[in-house]
Image (cartoon, helix red, strand yellow):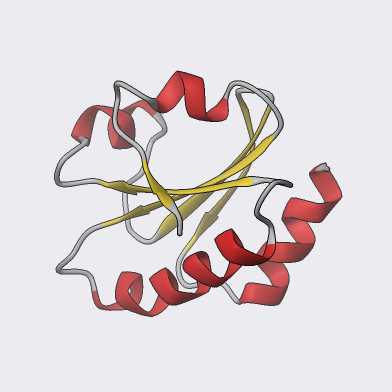
């Protein structure tokens, strides 16, 4: 299960290794299509990468900090630094490949 990120656990969650954060909102149609893909990846990559989601309605500071203008936006982090930003619905295969390239 993808973990929920807040400003309180953000730094701890992305500090080490590879993390994929899905910036989403409950009212966003494409986000509802992205969420099952993110959940599948969290199961498949358990122990390898951190897969997490950020509700932009509840965490506007994080969305603003990373320049999230439209959702879904997925940001890939390596050791706390953003290395890739993907806007719009992404396929499971493309996300998995991008994550594995950073491992």
Horizontal side of residue 5 vs 27, given as left or right? right
Using the image as rendered, state which of residue 41 and residue 32 is in the foreground: 41
Q: Position of residue 34 (x, y in %)?
A: 43, 72
Locate residue 12, reporting x and y percent.
49, 20
Q: Position of residue 14 (x, y in %)?
A: 55, 29
Viewport quadrant of the N terminus: bottom left
Q: Is residue 61 left or right of residue 98?
A: left
Please tell me whether residue 72 is drawn above or below residue 28 in the rendered image: above
Query: Quick one: quadrant of the C terminus?
Result: top right
- Give the vertical position of 25 relative to 53 (above or below): below
Quadrant in the picture for residue 91: bottom right
Q: Which residue: 14% across, 69% down?
A: 27
Corner quadrant of residue 58 = top left
> Residue 71, how many percent across, how many down?
33, 59
> In this picture, is 96 found above or below 15?
below
Report the number of discs. Answer: 0
Seen at 42% across and 32% down, the residue is 66
Q: Name the residue: 67% across, 66% down.
A: 44
- Position of 87 relative to 28 (above/below): above
Residue 91 shown left or right of residue 61 in the figure: right
The residue depicted at 72 percent of the width and 64 percent of the height is 96
């Amino acid at each position: 299960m993808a973990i929920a990120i807040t400003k309180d656990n953000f730094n701890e969650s992305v500090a080490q290794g590879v993390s994929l954060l899905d910036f989403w909102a409950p009212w966003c149609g494409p986000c509802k299509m992205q969420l099952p893909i993110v959940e599948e990846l969290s199961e498949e990559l358990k122990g390898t990468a951190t897969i997490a989601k950020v509700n932009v309605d509840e965490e506007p500071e994080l969305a603003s900090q990373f320049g999230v203008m439209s959702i879904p936006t997925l940001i890939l982090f390596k050791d706390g630094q953003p290395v890739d930003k993907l806007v719009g619905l992404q396929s499971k295969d493309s996300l998995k490949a991008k994550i594995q390239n950073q491992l």
